Image (tube, rainbow, N blue to C red):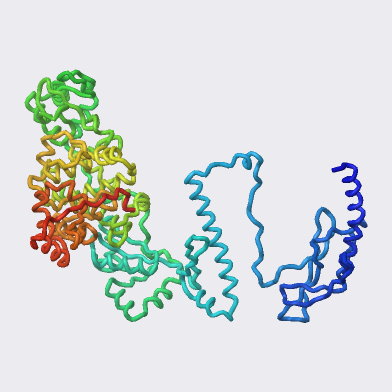
Amino acid sequence: MDLGKNIEEGSRFSRETPRKLEKVRNGIIENGEEIKSCTISSDIVSSDSNSNSNSTSDHGHPATPINRFPICKAVDSESPGAQIPMKEISIDGRRLERILPPHPQLPKLEPPRSRRVSLGELMHPPKYSPEKFTVEMMKLIRQSGNAISKRLSFLQEDDGDDSISDLAESDVTEFEISGVKVLVKLKSEEEIKGRITFFSRSNCRDSTAVRLFFRERGFDFSEINVDVYTEREKELIERTGNSQVPQIFFNEKHFGGLIALNSLRNSGEFDRRIKELLTEKCRGEAPSPVMYGFDEENYKDAVADEMMGFVRVLRQKLPIKDRLVKMKIVKNCFSGGEMVEVLIDHLDCGRKKAVEIGKSIAKKHFIHHVFGENDFEDGNHYYRFLEHEPFISKCYNFRGSTNDMEPQNAGIVGDKLFKIMSAILESYSSHDHSRVDYMRISRSEEFRRYLNLVQEFHRLNLLELSTAEKFAFFLNLYNAMVIHALIRIGRSDGMMARRSFFADFQYIVGGYSYSLSSIRNDILCGGRRPSYPLIKPFMNSNTRSEVGLQKLNPLVHFGLCDGTKSSPVVRFFTPGGVEAELKRAAREFFQNGGIEIVLDKRVIHLSRIIKWYKEDFSGEKKMLKWIMSYIDANKAGLLTHLLGDGGGSVHIVYKDYDWSINS
């Protein structure tokens, strides 16, 4: 193509363009036909005699047209006589034609929120990580929710649409937006400004009923469990005249217990009463909510150990160092003879008395033999303090030093453990305890007090527990340690990570370390190993064999929760009812998917827990008859039919185990 020809055509186009634009403004198109005027609805525009106004700019040049169509005024269809005024716009200082503004009843458009993107980002866009993708998705959902809320507020002004009015009356409205389910909660006319408070106790049915009632109604409430906050029981008696729970307060006014709540609920007066009592802000006379603080009642019971004076002297004067004992390097140890010499010098007493004091110190677990061979003897036997034990770094109830106060009675400590963990479970889990909110537990005052409680386990005398107390104590300790472990270290996928979870998370209890696997296998199962090599065997000790249960109860496997979706639900037990509570746990486990029977295929699906511990259930032959005692009548009938009809063998299939956390 000729370059000179192109230049000539370009010049001719630039000369003819102003004339063509002028023709368009005068209502004439290029073929000579005149544009006809029209009047349509409010969303359509009409032309008039002002179509050729402002044909030139302020500088005398022809104005640039907005488009190929004439610029017109809008006529409102509801008010034909009224015209919507047009607006003038200007770009780069040049005034352009008047344009039609949006309809006044349409939602106002908002400018998009954006940022400048550099050339480098365009050429090399950043890779989205899963975390950033999640943040962007949540931001999109929030923006969509805000847009829906604005649209709802506009639609509520339209009284002619019954569906919209019904929509506004409901509390929660469900929408589907771009594949994302959004719940929009409309703000109620009257907002509750007061506070609902009720006093409760752990494992109390009436307190559970009150808690469930308020949760179902969506009310925020402050619960004061007097088993956890023992100092608040005195306040309960002063306000109500007795220590019975539950006791409900609306602001500072005493409402009553469960009977009063049921009577108001049945009569329909509850909503009216709660609006009357809670429309005002809470005043100072109302029960104060639980706050982060020191559990002073526990410290009042603490008494200094009578051996502490001797222990302080020994920690200062004993030559603690690494030694070669039986061809092994033993760290931070001292000999029994050295300890006796220090006591003789300090007390100015005979050797016999010094040895007796040494035995008392060892009995209270201040010191241990390095190999666990004896309690205390004079001579070249080597010992070390409890805080120097090699397992101490793995114990998560150790805070830099051991608890040197006089240990409380183990039965009392076990009762405290049951009450505080029951309170945590009731407040921060679903109603059936199948889902646990570990995040809220980690931030709660109850969990902080639990961490203080487990400091009392260091030198606890476990031998003074009865068999039932011991059974309940270690069941509760196992389930509590699982909750602590999931909060503290979490859980990773893979067999090695699970093995580390059960073996490495430990507590000091009674002077010795206990992991989750040692509690299950050495204590509750009498030293029997599982039939799968998931758990590393622990070193047997004389103390652990003395504490361990001598008789295995297979029901124990339905009382231990591993914090997974396939394990039994988490629960805590009382010494007096541990046997009955374990039977109830087994029935609930089998009712909730622990066993499934396919009659026509002669197949029985069982939980993999049964396979792992099948020796504890007397093998597969007697296992099904044992299970029959803990399933409902329908499944028991099917199982009896399969075992006795002589129709052939019965196939047992073990389900896959879901290791995901039950949160």
Q: Position of residue 434 (x, y in %)?
A: 29, 57
- Residue toward you, 32 or 430: 32
Q: In which quarter of the view is residue 25 placed?
A: bottom right
Position above or below: 443 against 21: above
- Residue 92, image x, y percentages: 82, 53
Q: Is residue 83 left or right of residue 513?
A: right
Q: How many marks?
A: 0
Q: Residue at x 76, y 81 (%)?
A: 80
Q: Name the residue: 27% across, 47% down.
A: 482
> Which residue is depicted at the point 18% across and 23% down?
334
Residue 634 placed where, x, y %? 16, 67
Residue 228, quarter of picture: bottom left
Question: Could you tell me which quadrant the N terminus lies in?
Answer: top right
Residue 51: name its quadrant: bottom right
Which one is nearer the viewer's eye here, 395 or 465? 395
Q: Nearer the viewer, residue 322 or 146?
A: 146
The x and y percentages for residue 442 are 35, 49
Q: Please say whether residue 661 is visible from this viewpoint.
A: yes
Point 43% across, 71% down: residue: 278
Left or right of residue 62, residue 590 in this image: left
Residue 466 seen anywhere in this rendered image of the structure: no
- Please state if 618 lies on the left or on the right of 277 as rendered: left
Q: Residue lying furthest front in this view?
A: 1
Vertically, is 154 above or below 6? below
544 versus 358 height, above or below: below
